[in-house]
Every structure is written in C-alpha cells, then in structure tokens.
C-alpha cells in the first residue's frame, strides 16, 4: 500500500505525490534537445527546449507550484535550427550600450546553442534586462554567423585551458572536426558575444577519423587536473587527453548516438554509459585509470535507445541511468546497486594519483521502472524540478512536439501511472475508532510480582491496535521528526523504502509520505544530529555497511542526505546527546569500547577521544526486540520483550520502570515519548503487521 509522498519544503511549499507526469507545450515543432539550468538564479531550475524546425529555443520558467512547476514557455528566435544546448557563465568586456551587454549576461547563466545549417554558435540570456533580472522574456531573432564547418551537431561548455574563463567545444559530425573556442579571463573576453553569435574560426581544431561523429563530452578522465574530451565516432568512444593528447579508442558497438558521464563505482574515475540504437543496447564502460577502459554491464534495449542521462534516482548514493527508447515510446530507469561487497582486488595503475590499492565498489545494473511516454522520445535531462530532493526527468517528445516531465520516477519499485497530488495521507488509528481518547483506552495494569519483588514505577495504557499498511517491515523507530515534542513513527520495508507517520499524541499516526533509500534498513535511529530542532533519520544496512542520515530542514521537509559507511567493528548504533552542543551524537556499539561520533556543522564526523562512562556498559543489541532509550541526562533505560511469558519490560539498571503483558508475539519494539509527558512510551510490532501502542504514564499505586 502506498502512502502520500512527503511534503518537502525549500523556500516555498511544494507537494509531490508519488510518480506524476506533466505534459508541456513548447510552442514549436520538433523538440530535439533539453537543458536544465537555474537561468534567473532564484534557486529553482528552469527548462530550455531546442525546437529544430521552428528555429527557436523555448524556455520554461520554474513557477514553484505543487505538482506542475512549469507554465507557458517564452520563445527565443534564431536565424537557424538549433540542435544542441548548453549553459554557462561568460565574461563580458566593457559594456557599450544597454541592454546588449548588461551585466546580467555575466552574472546569470547563459544559454549556448549550436545550429545545423549555417552552421553557427549562439549565446543569450532569456532574462528581462532590468532589475531584478528574474523574469524570463521572449527575444530574438538572433543572427547566426556562418562558421567554417559543414554542420554542428553537439557542444560542451567548460574551462579547457584552466584560465578561469568559460570555453566552448563544438562538434562537426560530418566533416569530422572538433573546434574549441577559448575565452580569456585576463582580457575579460568571451568566445561568444552576449545576445549574439561568433563569426571567428576556432582557436583549436581536432580532426577526427571515421565516418560520422555524434556526441561530445568533457571530464578529467585521468585525474591530472585538466579536462579531457571524449567523442562518439561510429561505434567507438575516442578520448583526447587534455584536448590535445594522443587519442585512445574504445570499440563498443555500431552507432553510439549518446552517452553520459559519471563515477558509477565510486573509485574516483569518471566512467561512461553509452546507448547504441543499431546494436540495441546500453553499455557501461568503467574507467580503470591511465587511459585503460573496460566494458562493463551491457543491457538490451530493443526499442531504439537514443538518449541516456545520469542521476541518483533511488537515492542510495550510487549514480543510476535513464534511457529513452525512440521507437518503443518509453523511458526506462536503470538502477545501480552494490554487488560483491568487500571483494576488493584491483590496484590503481595510476599510482601518482591515489594511494594503492584503490578501493572500488562492485556494482550491478537492472531496469526497475519503465514509464510509457509520448511518441518518439529523443532527449532527456534530469533535475530536481519540484525541489523535493528527488530527481525528476524531462523528456523531449519529438513525434508530438511536446515535453513531458516525470516527477519522482523511482520513488518506489511499484509506482505505476499517475498518483494525484491531492490524494490524502492515510492515518494509522485503532481498528474501528475515529479518534481514540483516554476514556476509550483500556488500562493495562502492571503484571503481578513475586512476593518481595519491587513494583513497577509506571503502568502502561494500551490504545487499540493499529493496522500498518507496510508488508513485512524490516525496522521501526520512534522519534520527534517535526519538533512538536510528539514521537513520530518511521517504518522500513525490505524493498528500501522508509514510511513516515506523524504522531498525533494519542497513540495514532498520520501518514506523511515515504523516502526511497534503495537498501533494506536493518536499523533506524531518529535523533536531531545537526541541532536544528528537528529529528533526522539514520538508516543502516549491516550487510553492506551502507549508512545514510536523512536530514530534515522543516516539518517533514527533507534536506540533503549524507551517505557513508558504518565503522568496521560496529554491531549496533544509537544516538544520545552527550555535551552542550545542540546536535545528538552517534554512538556505535562494538562489544568493546563504543565509538562516539559528533556531527560537525559542515556535515562531517568527529570521533570523540573520551567516551562518557555511562556508555561504556552498553552492549550491542542484536535483536529488534530490545531498545535503548534516553530517560534523562546521561541516563539510559532498556526496553526489551520476553516471549516467555510474553511481556515488555522497561528497566533502568535494577529498577523496573514498567512491565506490560503483550498477550501476542512481537517481532520488534520501539520506545519514544508519544504523548509528550516526558516518559517513554512503548510500541510493539506483531508478526502479522499490526502495531501495538502502550502509553506509559502515571505512577502505580
């Protein structure tokens, strides 16, 4: 059962509810390329579309509205047909008259386009040339000066000569040339004039060998600090060290029309994913260092794959892929997952760049989500358009002259179709109850004690059982996520999703959404690690040692996540507030001396040299039927469940705080202050999936 996706807030309230699709009309014919960039620097990414047969670029401003962040487009007319777009910051020389070179063309990202027939290289900013420079306005026509090429098919914007000025590399796929236009920081010189085109020949020229070239990219493949070029020629990838070195060729297929660059296995080297419509495949190529490349996984795509983009769609810290298949009218999401963990054998051949041996993640790729789109998708771009910390994908629909936005494409493995933004969140309440209150909750007295044994300090009052709409939960946790003093509930499922429920204070919980981690959470801890007054979620997978802290920046509003590995000796993890800092510390229990990590303001970790004495006696709890809970400054209680005779105990040293008969078998327990009375309450998860809640409170008579 799906819950409403969490409302995420960045500046304004944006609601996202599962996977949704928005269709945009760019107002022109034959969309062939997409660009995502924050063109007016308001913190929200905008979208530009190259409209080939309309001789224009359509620009959509991000309106920051729930579930449909784009409205109508503004048109920038060109004197030739655009085929590819890029964005960058450019220097301007002395400004003669406004608005041709207003300073906004330097301090805001500019759109750069290459055109097919003249061919030409154009640069413009779509902003209104007056303060506050936030409004996107139509413009043009921009003249296109003819350059000494047969055609231009692709481009890259980057600083190739490391002088601090933006340069532009263009690809002529027919005459088989790469031209590089250099900017100059010292002279405040841009390779393309503002709101215009360049008429000069390139500063550098690279001649290619082969029949046809399709796609151009730039990255520091050898990690020497200088950008290199890669170009797809026929069925090969050809690498040029430092744009001028001896090329390296890698044969992969028949017609490599598009590729994407990212470090897929987290070894520090940029890898490549390439699509080949004639071979019908997506191929991942691993960069092994020193210009050695190794073909990795190859996945069959028989629907004519023509575009590929990268992004961490399932938010597990590994870069994933999205592939557009032109003839099949679909976008497939290929998830990158860890495999053969700890099998580290390969030394780094480039010993001058990193210490040897180099540690590498072994990864595998699989298609987990296929989204049907309009006719003939030809281009993709990935960006968090609705600013909910989940990547979205824009698709250029060539056959229908449309653009489609797929929001939250891999939010869960079973998302299919459109889920309305207005769907209400479910609420976990007692079976048959609309609003359980104190008068309706039966009192569950402390169990009878043998003569002479101490009586419990508190008693538990059980609210009616709650039906949990999550199958086979792998972990549960209680903690205050939104800072209202009431414990909220987080439930993990084996498929890698975390479900969030807001505590109502009476033992019921209202669904707030879910997070997609991608790994099964074996342990969950809720604590305010960054000291902003809001609880954060720490999730651990003990098999892989992968650990993530999901930071919250507002009431159920997700901030950036931090991915890292659990210490090798750690067997359990908890959180306690150990000093005067606002944030809580992470306590890794090893069975010997605990490891205590304090979270720095920059998000890093500092291990405390001295471990507080009250932590030294804490041992790892290897069963989900036991839980530590902080009941006061430097005071820890233990909640644990005993199957015989079926009771939950909350103890502090030799003092028994509460003893409750559950009556049915439990598979996990959690402790937290559900009703904000300062006393930890107890929650139990039954084998069948029901949640039992006991509010612990008044003193026993």
Image: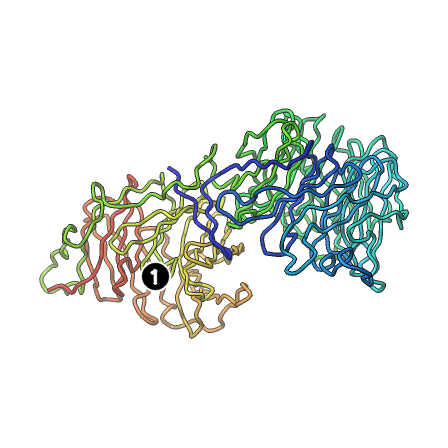
* On-image quarter of the N terminus: top left
Residue 184 occupies which quadrant of the picture? bottom right
Q: Nearer the viewer, residue 185 or 552?
A: 185
Crowding at label 1, few (<14), some or many (≥20) Cα neighbours within 10 Å? some
52 above or below 553? above
* On-image quarter of the C terminus: bottom left
- Residue furthest out toward the left: 451
How far across and how far down the image is residue 30, in percent?
Answer: 69, 31
- On the image, numbered disc 1 is attached to which residue? 484
Q: What residue lies at 52% left-to-right and 67% top-to-bottom? A: 600
How far across and how far down the image is residue 95, in percent?
Answer: 80, 62
Q: Nearer the viewer, residue 256 or 191?
A: 191
Task: Tell me, yes or no, if residue 373 can be seen here.
Answer: yes
Q: What residue lies at 21% left-to-right and 44% top-to-bottom? A: 433
Task: Tell me, yes or no, if residue 338 can be seen here.
Answer: no
Tag 1 secondary structure: loop
538 above or below 217? below
How far across and how far down the image is residue 199, in percent?
Answer: 88, 47
């Amino acid at each position: 059962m799906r819950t409403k996706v969490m409302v995420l807030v960045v500046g304004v309230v944006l609601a996202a509810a599962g996977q949704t699709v928005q269709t945009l009309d760019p107002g022109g014919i034959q969309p062939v390329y997409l660009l995502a960039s924050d063109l007016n620097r308001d913190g929200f990414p905008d979208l530009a579309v190259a409209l080939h047969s309309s001789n224009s670029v359509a620009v959509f401003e991000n309106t920051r509205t729930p579930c449909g962040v784009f409205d109508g487009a503004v048109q920038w007319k060109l004197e030739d047909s655009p085929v590819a777009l890029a964005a960058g910051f450019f220097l301007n020389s002395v400004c003669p008259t406004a608005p041709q070179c207003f300073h906004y063309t330097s301090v805001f990202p500019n759109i750069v386009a290459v055109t097919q027939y003249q061919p030409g290289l154009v640069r413009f900013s779509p902003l209104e040339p007056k303060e506050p420079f936030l409004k996107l306005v139509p413009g043009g026509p921009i003249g296109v000066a003819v350059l000494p090429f047969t055609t231009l098919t692709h481009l890259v914007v980057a600083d190739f000569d490391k002088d601090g000025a933006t340069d532009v590399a263009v690809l002529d796929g027919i005459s088989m040339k790469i031209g590089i236009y250099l900017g100059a920081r010292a002279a405040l010189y841009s390779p393309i004039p503002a709101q215009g085109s360049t008429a000069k020949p390139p500063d550098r020229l690279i001649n290619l060998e082969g029949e046809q070239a399709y796609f151009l990219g730039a990255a520091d493949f050898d990690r020497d600090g200088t950008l290199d070029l890669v170009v797809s020629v026929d069925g090969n990838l050809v690498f040029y060290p430092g744009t001028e070195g001896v090329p390296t060729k890698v044969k992969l297929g028949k017609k490599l029309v598009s590729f994407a660059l990212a470090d897929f296995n987290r070894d520090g080297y940029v890898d490549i994913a390439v699509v080949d419509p004639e071979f019908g495949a997506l191929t991942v190529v691993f960069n092994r260092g020193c210009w050695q490349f190794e073909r990795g996984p190859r996945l069959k795509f028989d629907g004519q794959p023509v575009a590929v983009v990268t992004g961490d769609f399932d938010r597990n810290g590994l870069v994933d892929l999205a592939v557009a298949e032109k003839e099949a009218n679909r976008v497939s999401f290929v998830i990158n997952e860890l495999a053969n963990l700890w099998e580290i054998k390969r030394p780094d051949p480039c010993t001058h760049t990193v210490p040897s041996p180099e540690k590498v993640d072994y990864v595998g790729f699989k298609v987990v989500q296929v989204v049907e789109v309009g006719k003939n998708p030809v281009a993709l771009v990935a960006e968090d358009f609705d600013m909910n910390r989940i990547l979205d994908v824009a698709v250029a629909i060539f056959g229908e002259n449309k653009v489609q936005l797929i929001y939250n494409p891999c939010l869960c493995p079973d998302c299919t179709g459109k889920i309305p933004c207005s769907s209400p969140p479910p609420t976990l309440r007692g079976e048959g109850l609309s609003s359980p209150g104190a008068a309706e909750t039966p009192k569950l007295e402390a169990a009878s004690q043998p003569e002479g044994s101490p009586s419990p300090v508190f008693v538990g009052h059980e609210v009616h059982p709650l039906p949990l709409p999550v199958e086979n939960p792998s972990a549960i946790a209680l903690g205050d996520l939104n800072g209202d003093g009431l414990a909220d509930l987080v439930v993990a499922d084996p498929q890698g999703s975390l479900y969030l429920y807001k505590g109502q204070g009476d033992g019921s919980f209202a669904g707030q959404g879910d997070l997609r981690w991608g790994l099964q959470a074996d342990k969950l801890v809720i604590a305010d690690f960054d000291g902003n007054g809001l609880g954060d979620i720490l999730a651990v997978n003990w098999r892989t040692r992968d650990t993530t802290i999901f930071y919250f920046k507002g009431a159920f509003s997700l901030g950036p996540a931090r991915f890292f590995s659990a210490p090798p000796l750690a067997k359990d993890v908890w959180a306690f507030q150990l000093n005067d800092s606002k944030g809580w510390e992470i306590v890794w229990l090893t069975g010997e001396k605990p490891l205590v990590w304090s979270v720095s303001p920059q998000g890093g970790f500092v291990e405390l040299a001295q471990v507080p004495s009250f932590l030294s006696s804490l041992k790892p709890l290897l069963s989900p039927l036991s839980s530590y809970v902080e009941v006061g400054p430097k005071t820890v209680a233990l909640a644990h469940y005993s199957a015989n005779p079926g009771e939950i105990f909350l103890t502090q040293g030799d003092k028994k705080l509460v003893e409750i008969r559950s009556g049915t078998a439990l598979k996990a327990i959690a402790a937290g202050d559900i009703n904000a009375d300062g006393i930890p309450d107890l929650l139990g998860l039954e084998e069948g999936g029901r949640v039992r809640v006991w509010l612990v409170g008044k003193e026993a008579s």
